[in-house]
């Protein structure tokens, strides 16, 4: 089946750099939040989706693909959907990568439920990539590696996706077993919002 055709919305994207791009995954169902639209939740006066998009853009990335149902965003993005819709984050990552018109050297992958993601963190992830490193992912104090707050070198990422085969309903963490991964400790940067308790923590 052909991949869904990406739709460019908003103002014309700037030329930026062809070396970097970002995929923001915004297709989750929010089941543990009673079906709430997590990317649309407002924390600190900004939706979680806009926080992730702004973090990528502020780090110098202008080629940003959002995978999920189309919503209003503060900055221009390219929209696409995973196949099938609801097929999980790995399917979303594959769809986002396919939606890029040019292949970047590095791809930043961000979830759309990160209350403390920042352009500084994205910059640190990109700076950590090297010839001996395929990916740099944030890790929290408990040692949990967060593959949805990470930067990947695109060529080994594509190879890992191809080796995994059908990405539907498979975890993004399956990629890490096939990549040379460095970690970046950042407790707040690794935090996401999955439950009402998580939301209450970031809405004092």
Image (cartoon, rainbow, N blue to C red):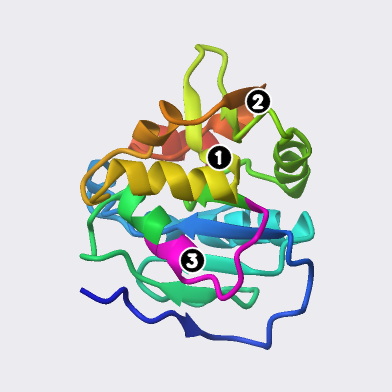
Q: For the residue labelled by badge 2, is the local secondary structure a helix, a strand or a loop?
A: loop
Q: Nearer the viewer, residue 188 or 26?
A: 26
Q: For the residue labelled by badge 3, is the local secondary structure a helix, a strand or a loop?
A: strand
The residue positioned 47% from the left and 71% from the top of the image is: 99
Mark positioned earlier in the residue sequence (2 or 1) = 1
- Which residue does the numbered mark 1 point to in the structure image? 149
Q: Nearer the viewer, mark 2 or mark 3?
A: 3
Q: Position of residue 48 (x, y in %)?
A: 52, 55
The quarter of the rendered structure image containing the N terminus is: bottom left
Q: Position of residue 123 (x, y in %)?
A: 77, 44
Label of residue 186 in the image: 2
Q: Which residues are magenta?
A: 95-106
The residue positioned 65% from the left and 25% from the top of the image is: 186
Label of residue 192 in the image: none
Residue 102 lies in the magenta-colored region? yes
- Which residue does the numbered mark 3 point to in the structure image? 66
Residues marked 2 and 1 touching at CB (< 8 Å): yes
Q: Nearer the viewer, residue 196 or 20?
A: 20
Mark positioned earlier in the residue sequence (3 or 1) = 3
Q: For the residue labelled by badge 1, is the local secondary structure a helix, a strand or a loop?
A: strand
Q: Is residue 186 shown above or below 89?
A: above
Q: Position of residue 46 (x, y in %)?
A: 60, 60
């Amino acid at each position: 089946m052909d991949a869904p055709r990406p739709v460019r919305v908003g103002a014309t994207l700037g030329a930026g750099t062809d070396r970097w791009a970002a995929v923001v995954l915004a297709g989750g169902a929010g089941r543990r939040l009673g079906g709430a639209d997590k990317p649309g939740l407002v924390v600190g006066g900004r939706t979680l989706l806009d926080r992730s998009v702004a973090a990528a853009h502020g780090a110098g990335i202008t080629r940003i693909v959002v995978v999920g149902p189309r919503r209003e965003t503060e900055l221009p993005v390219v929209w696409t959907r995973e196949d099938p819709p609801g097929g999980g984050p790995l399917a979303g990552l594959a769809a986002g990568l396919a939606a890029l018109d040019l292949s970047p050297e590095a791809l930043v992958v961000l979830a759309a439920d990160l209350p403390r993601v920042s352009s500084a963190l994205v910059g640190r992830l990109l700076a950590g990539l090297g010839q001996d490193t395929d990916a740099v992912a944030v890790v929290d104090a408990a040692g949990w590696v967060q593959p949805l707050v990470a930067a990947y070198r695109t060529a080994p990422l594509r190879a890992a996706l191809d080796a995994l085969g059908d990405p539907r309903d498979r975890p993004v963490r399956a990629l890490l077993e096939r990549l040379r991964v460095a970690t970046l400790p950042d407790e707040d940067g690794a935090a996401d919002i999955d439950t009402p308790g998580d939301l209450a923590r970031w809405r004092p």
